Amino acid sequence: MKISAVLLVVVGLAGWTLWMQSRPDSEPQDLPVWPVFKAAEVSDISISGTGMSLTHLQRQGNRWLLVDDHANGEKKHDVAANEEAVNHLLGNLAEMRLVRVVTHHTEHFADLGVDEAAGVHVILRNKQGSSLLDILVGNHGADLISTYVRLQGDNEAVTVNRSLTWQVRRMRKAWQAPPPESPQPSLAPLSASHSS
């Protein structure tokens, strides 16, 4: 029973993939021009979305800080950010390439997760405060390695060749640097003075 269910899923996915490739809009397209930037130019990252806490990351010299924007007049408690997570996201955003335009119809944005309610809003700024990239990140593509994305204010949703959804949906705490490993206590040598 389990094997036939798996076979049905595999056949269904294969059929769906063939159908997607045979659609008229899968033909080569004139792709829009998107912002181009280098990861090293980014000094400020803002990630927000419905039901998510704001994640605000700032470059300070050679390191990244997770900024406390919810201080409410209290002293801020900025903490070191998880450098690996930040650099991985920045690398993917800087190197992503448009694969195809999925739709120009706003009524399909919610299904793709790129509308204002469902999308994760990601803004990258340089040290002067100018926006380098302002996008809504939506759902994974059917291949699970692409992502539906839309430039903020644009009327076309596209797929890009990077898996971004899980990265931008990290909990705020997951952006913090892991605590330093505490040294393992050394075991005292067994005393050889046991009497037998």
Image (tube, rainbow, N blue to C red):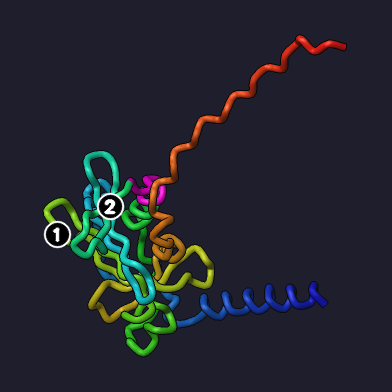
SS under mark 2: loop
Marks 2/1: CA–CA distance: 25 Å
In the image, what residue type sits under mark 1? Answer: Ser
Tell which of 79 and 129 is nearer to you.
79
As drawn, the residue found furthest toward the left would be: 128
Q: Earlier in the sequence, mark 2 or mark 1?
A: 2
Which residue corresponds to the image point at 38% horizontal and 60% vertical from the top-left? 172
Tell which of 112 and 184 is nearer to you.
184
Q: Position of residue 13 (x, y in %)?
A: 62, 75
Query: Residue 85: within the magenta?
Result: yes
Q: Position of residue 75 (x, y in %)?
A: 21, 54
Nearer the camera: disc 2 or disc 1: 2
Q: In which quadrant will I find the N terminus?
A: bottom right
Q: Vertically, is 130 above or below 17?
A: above
Which residue corresponds to the image point at 40% horizontal and 46% vertical from the top-left? 177
User: Which residues lie in the magenta part?
Assistant: 80-86
The reply to whether residue 85 is in sight is yes
As drawn, the residue found furthest toward the bottom would be: 107
SS under mark 1: loop
Q: Vertically, is 157 above or below 91?
A: below
Q: Position of residue 138 (x, y in %)?
A: 40, 73
In the image, what residue type sits under mark 2? Answer: His
Would you name the residue on which mark 1 appears?
130
- Residue 77's tag is 2
Q: Position of residue 117 (x, y in %)?
A: 35, 81
Which residue corresponds to the image point at 56% horizontal and 30% vertical from the top-left? 184
